[in-house]
Image: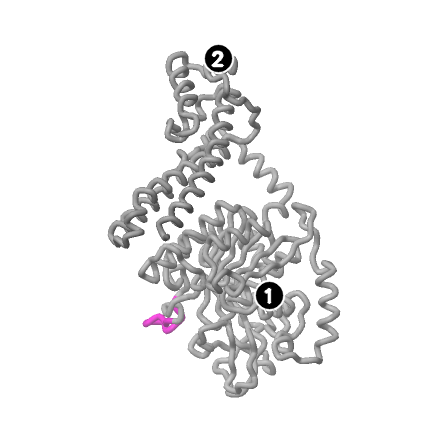
Amino acid sequence: MQDNVINEDLDFLNKTSTSKRSVVQLQLLNKVIQDKNYALIEDNNLTADFFPENKAEFNYIRDFYTKYHTVPDRLTFKSVFDTFRFENVDIPNEYLVSQLFKEYKTDLAVSKWNLGRDAVINGNEDAIYQMAEEILKTRDIGAPMNCIDLTSDTSRLEHFKERCNNKENSYMSTGFLELDKMIGGIDRLNENMVIAARPGVGKSWILLALAGACYRQGFKVGIYSGEMHEDKVGFRLDTFLGHISNKALNRGDSLVLNAYEEYMKELTSGSLATFNPYTGEKGFIKVVTPSMIDGGSFATINNLRNFIRKEHLDILFIDQYSLINDVSNAKQENERVGHISRAIKELQVLEKIPVISVSQLNRKASEKDKDTKEDVEQDVSQLSMSDKIGQDATIVIMLSKKPVDPEKNTVVNKIEPGKQYSRYQFTFNITKARDGGEGKLNYLVDLDTFECIADNTGPSKLKGDCSEDDLEESDSDEYYSDNEDDELDI
């Protein structure tokens, strides 16, 4: 019974693969004859193996070109292959080649499976792993790389002029004016930003603040939240966009009900966002959590790719690296996170939208210098689990925060038992910026309503200091005072 099911599946896969492949073969051969462009075959190292449905036709074109140094015209070709169907093909060469390679690899994988299916049926473990390894090798087969001669290609001059004339088309604002000035904003095509901090500092808050700012500019925003329920993500965004008490929203405080209803009318009418200057459309904020994924598991990179393509996202926010499912089966944690980091980078490059992710810092980030007793200077080596994250990132922003005494308006040295803090001094330490802009910025933030102002005037405005040891250390971005009823969700 099992053997019959496997055979039926393989028959279906073979038929499906053959059907698609024959169309691509026909299109590519037509394109070669139509454009008299044998380079399409030669430059991509195509052989008769790529044309199992049209081997004779391929071999004829190859032999004709080898002998006469030109591609046969339609009339000459038709005199030999009178049943060949000629079509005008307007599809780009790159697409045809990529599809041909895709179908070739699928067919090759099927043939590897056919050779090893008896091992699967009989439970031969060694043979199964050998077959799986052979199938995985087909993923590495690809068309030769294209290249650009930078000494003769001047297209980047036009791209530069476009940036000069339409800066809003090249960058998104972070929503933090001073940060925009320092790093230039969020590059719409080439940004892989990482926000890093110790647990409990507020990484998710800042990530979602950036998401809200991008929505206000009319962009289509996607968020993967591996930890928070969609309502909690929504409440935080409501706090950013409407400055409604986050504590009240989480506790169900009816005192903010009227204000919340009025805010919702504004939000759903689209009046809180502008039209996207690039597309002229209004944006949105869409969230995916593990409960929305088949099996209720953490998202894979493929899940995120489908999310981008299905919703036509302009930007993706990921919370966080440790809550993404790695399919490489790596045994070591740093290797697993390294695979995820590289996969996120490839996702950003191929989909051509910015990706902003959250990562944790390791214990080294809170150590003191043995001689000066000052905090160790932050750098990308403090990123937790894998140094690949810092290597793959275009910008790394390391966060730290210090609570501010509500009466004295000073940074507290030691948190007083039972005292609530909603106002913090956040420090943005830009430790890596591909296009320049490293440095530090301070912001005063009321996290309950997310009222935020720049505070880069130094100790004249805020006095005092506190060590990271005085701050909370939890496994999530939640702050707790000593009184359990005084929880402030940050």
Name the residue beneath numbered marker 1.
454
Q: Tell me residue 430's x, y (percent).
A: 48, 59
Residue visible at 38% across and 59% down in the picture: 337
Disc ID at residue 79: 2
Residue 55 image label = none
Q: Secondary structure at mark 1?
A: strand
User: How is the structure coloured here?
Assistant: one colour
Residue 345 percent across, percent down from the top left: 45, 50
User: Please, what is the dominant secondary structure of the magenta stretch?
Assistant: loop
Mark 1 near mark 2, Cβ–Cβ under 8 Å? no
Residue 18 falls inside the magenta stretch: no
- Mark found first going from the N terminus, 1 or 2: 2
Q: Position of residue 171 (x, y in %)?
A: 59, 49
| In this rendering, position of residue 135 left or right of residue 240 | left
The residue lying toward the viewer, choosing from 316 and 390, is 316
Q: Distance from label 1 to label 2 (Cα)?
A: 77 Å
Q: Is residue 109 above or below residue 284?
A: above
Q: Residue at x 46, y 77 (%)?
A: 471
Q: Which of the two residues, 346 or 166, is positioned nearer the viewer here?
A: 346
Residue 38 percent coordinates (x, y): 44, 21
Q: Does the rendering let one see residue 186?
A: yes
Range shown magenta: 367-376
Classify 10 Å Cα crowding around label 1: few (below 14), some (14-19), many (20 and above).
some
Three-letter amino acid code at the position of disc 2: Ser
Q: Nearer the viewer, residue 390 or 182?
A: 390
Q: Amino acid at mark 1?
A: Ala
Query: In the displayed structure, would residue 438 be above or below residue 362?
Result: above
Total labels: the figure holds 2
Q: Nearer the viewer, residue 473 or 144?
A: 144
